[in-house]
Image (spheres, helix red, strand yellow):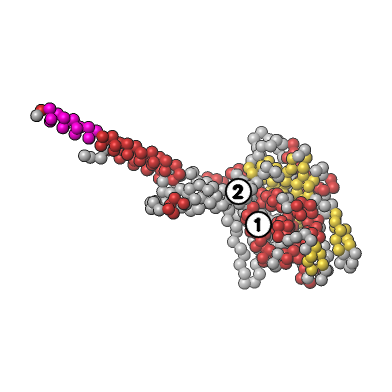
Amino acid sequence: MPFPKRLIVALVLATATAAFAAPTGTAQQAAGSAQCANRETPPPPVDTSEQPAPGQKAPTALEVPEKPIGGDRLGECGLILPPNSAQPPSGITAASWLLADMDSGAVIAAYDPHGRQRPASIIKVLLAMVVAKELRGDHVVTASAEDTQQECTCVGLKDGGQYTVRQLLHGLLLTSGNDVAHTLARQLGGVPNALRKMNAMAKELGALDTRAVTPSGLDGPGTSTSAYDVALIFRGAMKYDEFAQAIKLQQSQFPGRNGGTIMLQNDNRLLQNYQGALGGKTGFTDDSQHTYVGAAERNGRRLVVALLRGQQTPTRIDAQAAKLLDYGFAMGPGGVGKLVDGAPQPKQNVVPTQSTGTQDDAAAVDSRTGRPTPTAFGTVGLPITAVAGIGLLAGLLLFIRSKRAKAARARRQAAQGV
């Protein structure tokens, strides 16, 4: 008996639909993002600080994620606002900035948030986060001659001087001591190991535009971050009490180089002149220009703001941050994206093959979502194929049942004739 053609057609159509059912790509989005001037790297340096050492090559640019971290709109490189929003305040000179709710993670507004820039000293927030995670605040550290010879800004450490990790964190965050940054990096296993830990922390957070090349934020080959990443890192650091307590201090006593104590003054002016300021960090190099990250709280709502590659005229960078914070507090809870709560895992590349029916096929899972990875049939095609298969089985059963009924009738008729 020939196989029912209509069932064959149904199975073929279902299989074909499944094989070609796949999520739409991001080619159009990638094409648009490619026009962003700093999609892959910061602007060219203005000095020789990023020239590789003799015999070494500059690191390759960090890979650009296929989809913008935090949401599709954050891949845009112009002004990004929720629908029907007021325009941001005038006088913002930063080439890249972002404003977000620190608790919910909702990005309120941004300008080229994933545009790659240089961090300058605000990378010390990432160093402080690693220190707060790994070192006790009361642990005593002895400074070395190498620590005291760093390119300043410096607190003024003394060779052989002893300091607690907490005191060093105050020197790092209040007055941006590069000598302190080097000392803390040594406590993390040396500068190369400290940088590995800093970059691993950034990757764990989802700050995939960031590569720290010095613990202090001085420029070097391959340095990179973004306004999105800076806000994300600051938000993560504020979850460590040691960091949150240090960043909000207006001043702190510190062991003096020649005995006694000196008073460290916090160089973040928003602590003195902005209502609800929770702390922040400034930075500057010739290549990065002025950078800032900080947070404030009003009526139970906490906002974080990050600005990169800004100018001090006509308005200081911290005053520009204050303007954006005012703007954010006046806006509603809606947003244009999100500060992620951890690094999105890269999507596995799946080569379409015929299923072997083994346990390995059943166990294949997407590490990001926890769902089965697509096979040749895809996650949409599999149910369709299953339905087609059930239909085929039902058709075969009906066919067999009909065949048997006809045979029974024939036997009855033959018996009656006899």
Circle nearer the N terminus (1, 2):
2
Q: Measuring from the top left, give residue 210's x and y in whole percent.
A: 65, 56
Amino acid on which disc 2 is placed: Ile
Residue 31 appears anywhere in the view: no
> How many discs appear?
2
Of residues 397 and 307, the one drawn nearer to the viewer in this rendering? 397
Residues in magenta, as a range = 402-416
Q: Is residue 60 above or below residue 334?
A: below
Which numbered marker is on residue 154? none
Question: Image point 45% across, 44% down: which residue?
Answer: 379
**Quarter the C terminus occupies:** top left
Q: Residues within 10 Å of mark 1 (few under 14, many from 20)?
A: some
Q: Residues within 10 Å of mark 2 (few under 14, many from 20)?
A: many
Question: Image point 50% across, 53% down: which residue?
Answer: 348
Residue most extreme to the right: 260
Question: Image point 82% across, 48% down: which residue?
Answer: 271
Q: Which residue is mark 1?
A: 201
Q: Is residue 409 above or below residue 13?
A: above
Q: Is residue 195 above or below residue 226?
A: below
Question: Image point 74% across, 63% down: which residue?
Answer: 184
Q: Nearer the viewer, mark 1 or mark 2?
A: 1
- Quadrant position of residue 50: bottom right
Callout 2: helix, strand or loop? loop
Q: Which residue is mark 2?
A: 69
Q: Is residue 136 magenta?
A: no
